[in-house]
Structures are given as C-alpha cells and as structure tokens.
Amino acid sequence: MMMHFLTKAFDSILGPVQMNDIWKSLELMGKGMLGIFIVMVLIFILIFCLNRFTGNKKED
C-alpha cells in the first residue's frame, strides 16, 4: 500500500517515477551528505591543529 502511494505521489511532468529511481536518488543524496560531513570533519581537524600549534602563547 505504501509503495503504491509513493509511486503515485512522485509522478512528474516527464512521466511516472519508478520506485527504483527513488532509491537511486536517496542513495546518491546519502553519498553526497556523507561527503559533506567528511569534508567538514577534515576542516575542523585542520583548524584545531592550526590553532593548537600556532595559537597565541602566554608570555610571563
């Protein structure tokens, strides 16, 4: 019942959308979001390391 609803809900101007197309697009979106997350973590690590090694030193 739910699958039939999803395929009817995603009819487009270009024609009907198959359930396989929906799963492919979700897979592609997941890979893109994972890539963005990995890049954000790498930027965070880079900023953390730069701040740790080049940050202001306390002088007496």
Image (cartoon, rainbow, N blue to C red):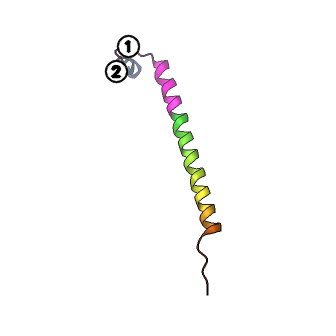
**Residue count near mark 1 (Cα–Cα under 10 Å), binned few <14, some 14–19, many ≥20:** few
Q: Amino acid at mark 2?
A: Ala
Q: Is residue 36 magenta?
A: no
The residue at 56%/40% (across/down) is 35
Q: Position of residue 20 (x, y in %)?
A: 49, 19
Q: Can you say which quadrant of the picture contains the C terminus?
A: bottom right
Give the camera-side residue of 54 and 48.
54
Question: What residue does disc 1 label?
Answer: 14
Q: Position of residue 48 (x, y in %)?
A: 59, 61
Question: Mark number for residue 9?
Answer: 2
Give the camera-side residue of 4 and 25.
25
Q: Position of residue 11 (x, y in %)?
A: 35, 17
Q: Is residue 20 magenta?
A: yes
Question: Mark number for residue 48?
Answer: none
Give the camera-side residue of 57 and 24.
57
Q: Secondary structure at mark 1?
A: loop
Range of residues picked out in magenta? 11-29
Q: Earlier in the sequence, mark 1 or mark 2?
A: 2
